[in-house]
Amino acid sequence: MQLTPCIYVTGFALLTYCSFGQTTQTNKVNTSAAEAYFKVADAIKSVSGEDNTSWQLLSSTPIYQMMIAGKAIDTIALKAEMKHVFAPSTSFSQARLSAKELYHKSYKDNRSQLDNYIGVCRDLV
């Protein structure tokens, strides 16, 4: 009977010791893709127009590299959709937007909230 409490205490100590390293790590959120996405949007909205450097930055982020390699994203279609939504001269009704363009429009409409979220995530690192 005396052995059972010793097993529980030893098990608890081992569990605490093994999980201690996990609890002391900080959560890291990679915001590079979101930041690059908005750099592309800003380049499209600017007077000078599109900037190849911002597109290269977007496609070099780990998330977009994974989506491009897995053929989950068509870069030509992505460029066309973003240009259609973020171009300064674009006036559109939501009825004429594709589902993917509506997705980009929701990013455009909620930009300030997303920028705040990115800032908070960046502060965690």
Image (cartoon, rainbow, N blue to C red):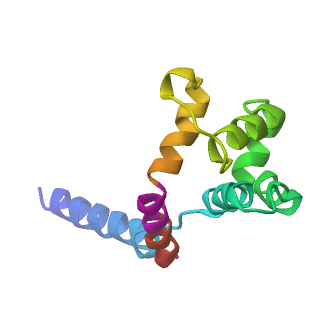
Q: Main secondary structure of the magenta part?
A: helix
- Which one is in front, 18 or 76? 76
- Dividing the picture into quadrants, the one containing residue 92 is top right
7 left or right, relative to 83? left
Farthest-out residue, left:
1
Image spot of residue 27 (x, y percent):
47, 67
Residue in the picture at 60% in, 32% down: 101
Q: Which residues are magenta?
A: 111-117
122 vs 56, nearest the viewer: 56
Placement of the N terminus among the 4 image quadrants: bottom left
Horizontally, residue 51 falls left or right of residue 39, namely: right
Vertical position of residue 3 compared to residue 108: above or below: below
**In the image, is residue 14 above or below residue 72?**
below
Q: Position of residue 54 (x, y in %)?
A: 80, 60
Is-magenta flag for residue 68? Answer: no
> 90 or 10, which lies in front?
90
Q: How many marks?
A: 0
Q: Residue at x 80, y 57 (%)?
A: 49
From this view, report whether residue 39 is shown above or below residue 17.
above
Magenta includes 114?
Answer: yes
Residue 119 vs residue 66: left or right?
left
Residue at the image position 78 percent from the left and 33 percent from the top: 70
